[in-house]
Amino acid sequence: MQLLYNIAAIIIVILIIPMFMVRSVREKGFVERIRQSLGFFPEHALDKVEKKDCIWVHAASVGEIVATSPLIKEFRKEFPKSPILVSVVTTSGYEMANRIIKDADAIIYFPLDLPWLAGHVLRRIRPRVFLPVETELWPNFLRTARKIHVPVMMVNGRISDKSVKQYKHLHSLLRNMIGTVKLFAMQSPIDAEYIMRLGAPQELVTVTGNTKFDQTYTDVSPEEKQKIIEEMGLSKNDGIFLAGSTHRGEEEAVLQAFKAVRETHPHARLVIAPRELLRTMEVVHLCRKAGFSVTTRTKLQNEAPQDEDIVILDTIGELGKVYSIGDVVFVGGSLVPHGGHNILEPAAHGKAIIVGSHMFNFKDTYALFKNRDACLTVKNGEELAKQVTRLFDEPEHRHRMEEETRAIVRENKGASRKSAILLHQMLESYESSPENRHHVRSTQKITNFQTYFIDLVHSKEVDGLFPHLIMGILYIFSLIYGLLVNIKLAGYKYGIFQKQKLDCFVISLGNVTVGGTGKTPTAQRLARDIRDMGYRVVILNRGYRAKWHGEVGIVSDGKRLHMDAAEAGDEAYMLAKHLPEVPVLIGAERAKTGRYAMEHFGAEVAILDDGYQHWQLERDLDILLVDAVNVFGNGYILPRGTLREPISHISRADICLMTKVDQAAAGSCDYIRETVHRYNPEARIVESIHQPRCFIPLTEWYVNIASQGIDIAQMRGKRIMAVSAIGNPASFEQTLSDLGAVIIESLRYPDHHDYAMSEMTDIFQQAENAGAEAIVITEKDAVKIPADVAREKWSIPIYVICVEVNFQKGSEGLADLLKKRLAERLGH
């Protein structure tokens, strides 16, 4: 069932792309909605919530945001130290959330529930708990929540008759979704009965009431009410009829009722708020056709009011407050079989309310008001005209309804507070249980988009129709990508695109595959060797994942660090930590950072870290790294494989450096040699190994540059836990085993994973339970671990393994070539 759902979801997205294109032109903010729905969030949008154990509340649109507003206030009181994230689906919901929810730390669009995408965003944020408002259940998202042990609690739960019938067709998909939710806080006994009918265990279902009774954002003072009336040009009136959230087919009935009211109240005015703002001009034409003068709210914001008969409310998020000016209110979506809209917003203002007979989406709230004569029901335009006229003509009857409405609202407040208390109790119970107290979130238990993709393209998960379909699509994109790469490279080769040149010796160091080949330690070794030859050398890094943005960033001037790991990016920071007297600079354009290095540091040699594809800059020496453990990826170009460019582009390399040859499988090195010679007979081939230099305690690693640490022999025979978030964790673990360490547990996280404090606490707890004597991480992991971890005192020490590259076979040729080329260019 999950497979069918995923195929259907992808097909639907593809089919509605044309509609998305139209809406992106017509609707303000729609492009940003799609960007975020695809997982591309604005810079720093998630800084306050990402991996900070936030409370994630999801509300689809305006109605759910209204219900969410009082919940957020209560969650803030109950969890003052927990950041709060609110997500929405619609642009109107997004605008409404930003307007009325002031206690949220971040407000975003919810990701599309596509395979991998929804899970990728969930793993990135890693909330403490996920709270869908009403019935926002998404299979892929909840599937990931189960895998990574994020508890889910439904708040202000509501199930319509129609939804019950539709959900039953989901079978196993429904069971999985319902089984993910730890607690169901439902609006009414009817909703509770329906959710149990769908499979929710009775002991997990409770009735809290409707949180919309608690909302206060629509509170309007007498002065504010008068201001709204004046701004909308409604000052001269003998009664205001307000029709909210109307649908196509209802405005005609509303206009018929207004015409009847005008017979006895000639100065009565009408406000219509169409549910869909795109229908504004359609409703304007209907009003004019009926013989009334009409204007819109947005038009009145730019010109003086003209006392028109009708005002169309064509703004987002104002209806809740504008309900306050109505004397009689009709709530739409109910004369047509849409299911109605929530009557609690006008009820909060104590209004006399009229609805149509189709209120099945709000059955319980509707029944509550109807049974106490606080709400009138009509079947058609004639009955609507009759009831509206009666309420205008009989103010005492209208006032009785208004009093009863206010009484119902007063009696039903408190659902938000109940929900906050239930959430606290649920989290205490969940987090204190043995299976969750000692749970470690490792990629042995979870996969995200990145790790799933890597397994998929390496043919580790190709069973079934769906993966094969994805692989076929990716292959087509690979052909396109490969063509574009070749065109771009040809442009530089034949002078169509201009290359830039530096007045220093430029060495490019890189690879043709995605993932770790050992560029960072190789760049360190190369820089040290050139420095020791007497040349002034700098390293130019692009600053991958750096928070710093600008043309030239100085990570290190060779004497001290000027940026931390977050600012510089982990690769540049690690380079700077181990290279005294070698400045490290970051910037997207290496020509600019190179010129800066020459002007300010007197650079004679510039090493382009990960620069094999940086064709914009001429280089004197190209060194290509090939991982002897993971040879040329899987032979396919991105996105079908892990090749950045075709293998034939080995032809550009002056030197091919095989890394980790001591860990290579039999025949791998011979295969690499044959492949290199096939495309580049002139290239020199050099072998290297990654040799551990020392183990540095994390506390010492954080404060010292080029620390010596402890001898590697001291780890022999120790029971250790290996923790890593790198491209090739097997190589790291093999290195530890070769040193004689006893690995009792290995935890693997996605490459470039940022560790949360809660994760580190879990790791230490599991290491203690397993009887580990030490935890060992890589330098790449060290820069991703919170500084607070180093400052805390733990029962088990954590060490950072520092490795260095040692050139093996072919090293003499490399040294000779390097000295010769440097002397020819620089004259030393």
Image (tube, helix red, strand yellow):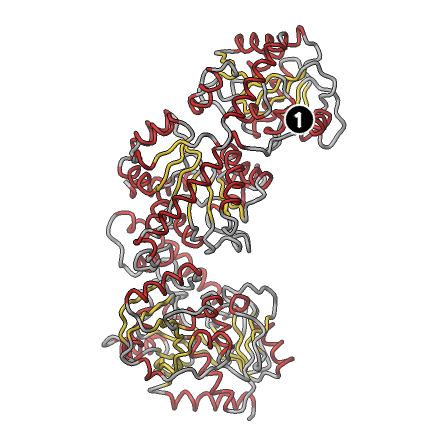
Q: Residue at x 70, y 13 (%)?
A: 238
Where is residue 812? Give x, y as percent.
38, 91
Q: Give above or below for 358 relative to 208.
A: above
Where is residue 29? Give x, y as percent.
57, 42
Of residues 688 and 583, the one nearer the viewer is 583
**Residue 362 sits in quarter:** top left
**Residue 732 sits in quarter:** bottom left
Q: Give above or below for 62 relative to 327.
A: below
Q: Give above or below for 541 relative to 131.
A: below
Decide if residue 819 is on the left or right side of residue 516. right
Q: Residue at x 63, y 10 (%)?
A: 395
Q: Residue at x 64, y 80 (%)?
A: 600
Decide if residue 146 is on the left or right side of residue 294. left
Q: Dot 1: what SS?
A: strand
Q: Give above or below for 471 relative to 623.
A: above
Q: Around disc 1, counting alpha carbons within 10 Å, would you say few (fewer than 14), some (14 to 19), or many (20 or more)? A: many
Identity of the amino acid at label 1? Thr
**Residue 497 sits in quarter:** bottom right
Q: On the rendered image, what quadrant is the N terminus found in? A: top left
Decide if residue 82 is on the left or right side of residue 282. left
Q: Give the labeled residue for mark 1.
A: 296
Of residues 166 and 360, the one nearer the viewer is 360
Where is residue 411? Give x, y as percent.
51, 25
Decide if residue 317 is on the left or right side of residue 787. right
Q: What is the tally of numbered marks visible in this picture?
A: 1
Q: Residue at x 62, y 8 (%)?
A: 394
Where is residue 293? Give x, y as percent.
69, 17
Q: On the rendered image, what quadrant is the C terminus found in? A: bottom right
